[in-house]
Amino acid sequence: MPKTKSRKGKFTSVSIPIPLFRKIEEHIADTGFTSVSSYVTYILREIVAESASESSSASSAKEDQKKVKERLRALGYLD
């Protein structure tokens, strides 16, 4: 994991292209989001949570499949 410079508070800066920033501003107008930063933070949290969920589901499915194969092998259905 890359190290980041220690900064005041618990935030860091991420640069995005100005046209994208403007589109996000338009997108969040009249919503509950108070800033582009709060919206981007929300979206990134959603993506990370979804990714983590998919990863754990995939590993869980692999574990389940392994257990089924072991059981079938123990019962003599697989070599």
Image (cartoon, rainbow, N blue to C red):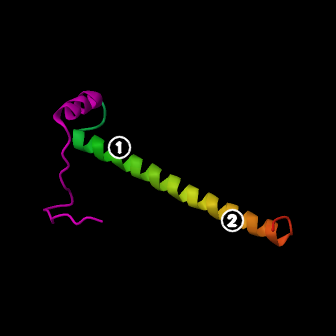
Q: In the image, which disc is placed on residue 43?
A: 1
Q: Is 28 on the left or on the right of 70, as rendered? A: left
Q: Is 66 on the left or on the right of 30, as rendered? A: right
* Main secondary structure along the magenta-highlighted residues: loop
Q: In the image, which disc is placed on residue 54?
A: none
Of the two numbered discs 2 and 1 on the same chain, state the one appearing first in sequence: 1
Q: Mark yes or no: residue 35 visible.
A: no
- Which x, y percent locates residue 43? 35, 43
Which quadrant of the structure image shows residue 60? bottom right
The residue to which callout 2 is attached is: 66
Distance from disc 2 to disc 1, alpha carbons, whole Å, reads: 35 Å
Q: Amino acid at mark 1?
A: Ile
Query: Between 1 and 30, which is closer to the camera in this rendering?
Result: 1
Highlighted magenta segment, given as a residue range: 1-30
Q: Is residue 25 magenta?
A: yes
SS under mark 1: helix
Q: Mark yes or no: residue 3 visible.
A: yes
Which quadrant of the structure image shows residue 64? bottom right
- Which x, y percent locates residue 17? 19, 37
The residue shown at (19%, 31%) is 19
Q: Amino acid at mark 2?
A: Lys
- Which x, y percent locates residue 5? 15, 64
Q: Is residue 55 magenta?
A: no
